[in-house]
Image: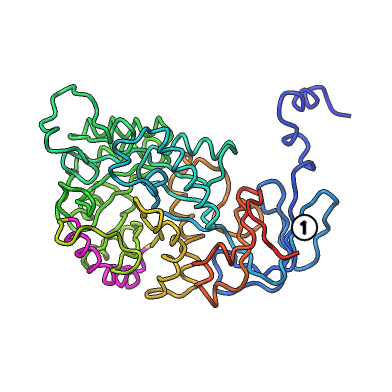
Amino acid sequence: MKTFPARLACILIPAWLCCTSALAQTVFTNVRVFDGKSAALSAPTNVLVKGNVIERISSTPIAADAASVVIAGGGRTLMPGLIDAHWHTMLVRPSPAAVMVNDIDYTTLVAAAEATDTLMRGFTTVRDLGGPAFGLKRAIDEGLVPGPRIFPSGAMITITSGHGDFRHTYEIPRALGAPLSRVESVGGAMIADGADMVRMRVREQLMLGASQIKLTAGGGVASPHSPIDVSTFTEAELRAAVEAAENWGTYVTVHAYTSAAIQRAIAAGVKCIDHGHLMDEATAKMMADKGIWLSIQPFLDDEDAVQFPPGSIQAYKKAQVVAGTDRAYALAKKYGLKTAFGTDILFSPQLAHRQGAMLAKMTRWYSAAELLKMATSVNAELLALSGLRSPYSGKLGVVEEGALADLILVDGDPLENIQLIADPAKTFFVIMKDGKVVKNTVPR
């Protein structure tokens, strides 16, 4: 017989917390598991998901009760959901002009549709590196909209004239106490000059729910007034951001292409460099010695390249970055850098459909096993830097007992044919996020 406190607890809290036997169960039978870490698939295996957690992995049959969902794997591959470590939830579909003029509610609805498509491409988690994604993240977490887990940065923080300062020249000079610019008012970027202002802007994003902080430490390709060679924040400004983030138990990542920008950020205590395409060998060695993460994207002059008007300054800057891509990956491999996969797709619903293809084409530098580990367990290690600021409790990026049940059933062996990742509509028979099946096209 339950004691009174135990009976009272069942009255006051949801039933699933008191009666774990009521948790929904899914059993995957006869699957070969890519666990996110190994270079080979398992022997035929059975996997039990209970609630939102992988409860059991067994080579022997797992009994399923009448209420359980049974998915016959047919020898297909069960793997962790994919993770994109450089994503902009709010900025994938709209054009730059639309972002600046559209109603933010409409922009959020567009982003919600894209979030659903992102999930259906098998990306069950994204690290958002700039944009007002907090509301959409909440809607996804509450089950109002299908979409990936979002690790939000909130507004990326930049300086006057830095990457992310999209004001027009007629808005300069900015008077003290003047209203926020459009990009600031919608939460896309915040302009901060001086350590005290940087510290305040970082704390604001943390208050809003940021799991990590994003600063633009160097020039960018798309920004109209930010040369690629420029280092933006001073070391003192960067250190103020790092201190504010570390006080909250999380970390700072920076947008930086050049060695100068990267080295200054490292000196200030930054834990992750996003991009890094123009780094030199000394900088790569410094990153390796200090255990700094490199979140780099496969920017090449191919079908996935963002197109700028010929002869424009943006086209010139893009060419510089593309020219450094092969060398940057070579340095990352030479020095064993902790390297994350991300796409950084912006302003292009057409490119968004190639999210998985951008991973698959990286066989230019890595084996299929290395790529799949990078987009699952390795990316999950980067997400773990958020510590207690992580929005989600549990282990991501692996198929193991006790891990969160974010899973994909692939029709084939992606370790043998990585191109399977590039065609998710055809090859991803089952997509599960947080223990819930969002797609199931297994032949009956």
151 in magenta:
no
For the point 25% across and 54% down, which residue is it? 256
- Asked if residue 318 lies left or right of residue 173, the reply is right
Q: Residue 313: x and y, percent? A: 15, 56
Residue toward you, 271 or 62: 62
Q: Which residue is mark 1?
A: 70
Q: Residue 373: x and y, percent? A: 50, 65
Question: Considering only vertical position in the picture, is 36 above or below 163?
Answer: below
Residue toward you, 398 or 433: 433
> Dot 1 lies on which element?
strand
Quarter of the picture holding the C terminus: bottom right
Q: Which residues are magenta?
A: 314-337
**Residue count near mark 1 (Cα–Cα under 10 Å), binned few <14, some 14–19, many ≥20:** some
Applied colour scheme:
rainbow
What predominant SS class does the magenta segment belong to? helix
Q: Residue 132: x and y, percent? A: 38, 37
Question: Considering only vertical position in the picture, is 296 above or below 138?
Answer: below
